[in-house]
Amino acid sequence: MKYKTKQKQTILDLFKDNEDRHLTVEEIKTLLDEKGENVSIATIYRRVDELAQEGLIQKIVFDNTSKACYQIKSHDDCMNHFHLICEKCGKLIHMDCDEVEHIVNHISKDHNFKVNKSRVSFYGICEDCRGNK
Amino acid sequence: MKYKTKQKQTILDLFKDNEDRHLTVEEIKTLLDEKGENVSIATIYRRVDELAQEGLIQKIVFDNTSKACYQIKSHDDCMNHFHLICEKCGKLIHMDCDEVEHIVNHISKDHNFKVNKSRVSFYGICEDCRGNK
DNA sequence: TTACCTGCAAATGATTTGCAGATTT
DNA sequence: AAATCTGCAAATCATTTGCAGGTAA
């Protein structure tokens, strides 16, 4: 991180405190406001974009929304990380699994494509909602 | 399709003529204009949304853009369909593969989640660009 | 005839940008 | 001091909506 400001650090810290969550820019704003850390929306957009460029967080846009989400990248990244999105209750389940790794190997070997990051989302009905039917 | 208008049919036909492509609303507009079929942007948004609701086409938003894409759904759908997106040249490769099917089975069985549709994208460097380096 | 459509132009929502002053290196 | 930042307000871009006719069932 060549340039470091209080605001940028504040934003990054928030991601560290929310390792397992996706945050929209608006959620970031609200969470920071609640902590008494006031960072303007424009700055959040700018820093979040930069953090994504620097590879510290990852940008994700789901098909059923118009807002971008951001999430901190851990060393194992999204390489073995799935999203299960319930179409009924909207719940987002993070699922860690070896299956993606298998695919990545397959793609590298059989399709000669070097994978840097992945996005794997499944839309459907979650356990709870299946029960409730 | 309970209600059918010339415009809606025109749009659906365009998707049929472009089975293998993702189209943005703007691309649809341009392609229709070129064919002398004038459908307003607002109508395209409305019909494309409806077609997606009806399950005839599918909405996709990639992480590196702010525009939604739409693509016709074939009977085998996106259940065994991957996206490989080259971060260097921007190329989008469609890849049909059994691997997704394996995962879907795994999710249903081991995670008790009924999958209706999937979104599997890998970002990285394609064969051509690997060679060019 | 009634329900739903169309195009247009105005409205909305998310994101970006220009600018003047502040902070980091 | 120079580079890059910040907040604010205005601008932009994609998408949505209200309305006054038009078309499909």
Image (cartoon, coloured by chain):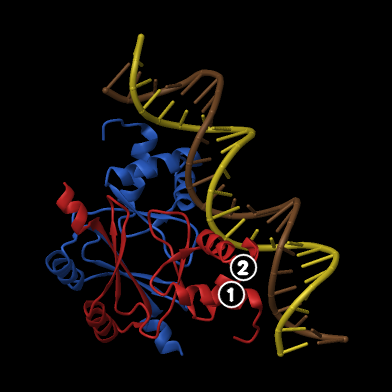
Chain colours: A red, B blue, C yellow, D brown
| Mark with earlier residue (2, 1) | 1
Image-based side of B105 in relation to C5, left or right: left
Q: Quadrant of the N terminus of chain A?
A: bottom right
Seen from the viewer's position, the closer of residues B105 and B23 is B105
Where is residue B121 shown, x and y percent of the image?
A: 34, 70
The mark tally for this picture is 2
- Residue drawn 51% across and 73% down? A14
Image-based side of C16 in relation to A130, left or right: right
Chain for mark 1?
A
Disc 2 to disc 1, C-alpha distance: 8 Å
Helix, strand or loop under label 2: loop
Where is residue A31 shown, x and y percent of the image?
A: 53, 63
**Amino acid at pointer 2:** Glu
Residue that mark 2 sits on: A37
Rate crowding at label 2 as few (under 14), some (14 to 19) or many (20 or more) other CA atoms within 10 Å.
Answer: some
* Relative height, residue A5 to residue B114 (above, below): below
Image-based side of B71 in relation to A27, left or right: left
- Residue drawn 32% across and 47% down? B52
Nearer the observer: mark 2 or 1; the answer is 2
Helix, strand or loop under label 1: helix
**Amino acid at pointer 1:** Thr
- Asked whether the residues under marks 2 and 1 belong to the same chain, the reply is yes
Where is residue C3 shown, x and y percent of the image?
A: 33, 22
Residue that mark 1 sits on: A10
- Residue drawn 50% across and 60% down? A27
Image-based side of B3 in relation to B65, left or right: left
Say if residue B89 shows up in the picture.
no
Whether pointer 2 and pointer 1 mark residues with C-beta atoms closer than 8 Å, the reply is yes
